[in-house]
Amino acid sequence: MKWQTLETKKGTRGRVLEGGSGAPVVFFHGAAGLLADNPFLDRLAQRYHVFAPEWPGYGESTGEELLEDMLDFALHGWDLVDALALRRPHLIGHSMGGMIAAEMACLAPRDLDRLALVAAAGVWLDDHPIPDIFAMLPQEIAEVLFVDPARGAALLTGGADLADIEALKDFYIVTQRRLAMAGKILFPIPNRRLSKRLYRLTAETLVLWGAADRLIAPAYAAAWKALIPAARVQTIEGAGHMLPYEQPEAFVDALVRFLG
């Protein structure tokens, strides 16, 4: 897969990881961003034409000052689809990206084919409050994102040793830029009343969850199912919140069965 850079009508400029051929699939990443290695995207690209844009404020993408609220994020998603000249792509959203993809599907229900929500934010259950990642130290974040925190920390940092003060400083700066952007729709809680708009969603929908998710509990999969009655739900063992990275083969297999 290769990076390309594009500019939207609104003036944001960002990178998109692209590869493969076949039906178009757009993958929207979560608050952690795209990592150095994304093996699940490589696997998807063996079957589909995959596009994975970075949100403004992530990597080399700019224009974060132009996005202020949930509507801005959702419209930006469609601006990216337009800039890529795609017609009715499949949308896949992980965590924060799932929240945005669901909003996009509610805004323009006829402009996508199928929708996959992966450990999606956007719904709130008082019995299962979502931990405040904005109050966590960098080394604590891996504890709630991964089944194996040590491996997760290595994935998040690209193998950098956080015991090294300079490496920790660099990771902290990058993380804070990302969280500052994500906080616009996730802080103090990731609830922007999406549930009131889901009645507009008509796309066939798959809800995927890691069985050991410690950030957004698997109980949320049932909540999404209650809000989208026709949705299919699948839980994958051996994965936490970062399901695509922890179980890339099972993740892609589930998507292939759903997308066809």
Image: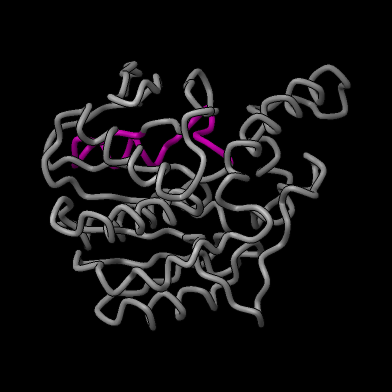
Task: Tell me the colour scheme of the image.
Answer: one colour
Residue 194, percent from left and from top: 43, 65
Residue 115, percent from left and from top: 27, 58
Q: Is residue 43 magenta?
A: yes
Screen quadrant of the N terminus: top left
Query: Which one is nearer the viewer's eye here, 251 or 51?
Result: 51
Q: Is residue 149 above or below residue 9?
A: below
| Total number of numbered discs in the rendering | 0
Question: Which residue is painted at 40% across and 23% down in the image?
Answer: 12
Question: Which residue is painted at 50% across and 54% down in the image?
Answer: 95
Q: Is residue 161 magenta?
A: no
Screen quadrant of the C terminus: bottom left
Query: Which one is nearer the viewer's eye here, 32 or 238?
Result: 32
Q: What residue span does the magenta drawing correspond to?
A: 32-52
Query: Which one is nearer the viewer's eye here, 170 or 85?
Result: 85
Residue 192, percent from left and from top: 51, 61
Q: Is residue 203 above or below residue 141?
A: below
Q: Is residue 18 left or right of residue 238?
A: left
Question: Which residue is painted at 23% across and 36% down in the image?
Answer: 81
Q: Quadrant of residue 208?
A: bottom left
